[in-house]
Amino acid sequence: MPLHLIKLCVGAESIKDHEDWVKLRLAQKKAAGEPVEQTHRTRMVPKRVDELLDGGSLYWVIKGQVAARQEILDIRPFTDGEGISRCHIVLKNKVIPVMPRPQRPFQGWRYLPDHEVPEDLKAGAGQVAEMPETLRRELRELGLL
């Protein structure tokens, strides 16, 4: 059974904002001649790597709600220039919206068991998938979603 991570998407105002940031970073890496892959640098290295790589995703909290996810492709520990252990979480470039769910702020990342993840927001989810993200957020805040 996969294990997931959950993390605040600091600075993002919406899923589109995060998607635009991903595109920008990938373009910057390409221009610099670096491997064109999305990595997220963290201070702490997850201990449960095998479970995360068994189909896990990184769930992003945007504006107080779990809003989207990206599949985890790899976990790459490294030591920075100051001798501190860190890691890069390598993510699939595609950002997948999920059913919004409130989430209080926290520092760093947390493990998220598979049975606690919100379902993906797919075209088959009816009218909810067609709503603008701001409307979904407002309805969720009102307890109507």
Image (spheres, rainbow, N blue to C red):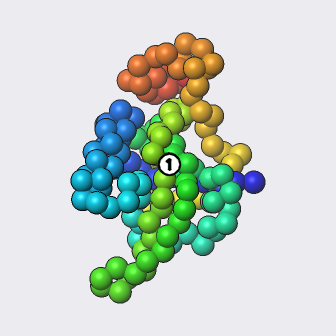
Query: Residue reaching furthest top?
Result: 127
Question: Percent position (x, y) of residue 95?
Answer: 47, 39
Query: Residue reaching furthest bottom?
Result: 83
Tally of numbered discs? 1
Taking depth in this image into account, of 8 and 56 the one nearest to the observer is 56
Q: Is residue 113 left or right of residue 134?
A: right
Please say if 118 is above or below 141: below
* Residue 113 can be seen in this image: no
Identified at 57% across, 20% down, the residue is 123
**Callout 1 environment at 10 Å: few (<14), some (14 to 19), or many (20+)?**
some
Identified at 53% across, 20% down, the residue is 129
Q: Quadrant of the C terminus?
A: top right
Please say if 112 is above or below 14: below
Taking depth in this image into account, of 89 and 13 the one nearest to the observer is 89
Query: Residue reaching furthest right?
Result: 1
- Name which quarter of the figure residue 5 lies in: bottom right
Question: Percent position (x, y) of residue 136?
Answer: 46, 22
Please say if 143 is above or below 116: above
Query: Residue reaching furthest front?
Result: 33
Q: In this view, does 91 lie to the left or right of 32?
A: right
- Name which quarter of the figure residue 108 lies in: bottom left
Identified at 63% across, 19% down, the residue is 124
* Residue 69 can be seen in this image: yes
Identified at 60% across, 14% down, the residue is 126
Q: Where does label 1 land, which residue?
A: 92
Question: Percent position (x, y) of residue 45?
Answer: 50, 72
Residue type for callout 1? Lys
Question: Percent position (x, y) of residue 109?
Answer: 48, 59
Which type of secondary structure does the marked residue at label 1 adopt?
A: loop
Q: In which quarter of the image is the N terminus?
A: bottom right
Please say if 28 is above or below 13: below
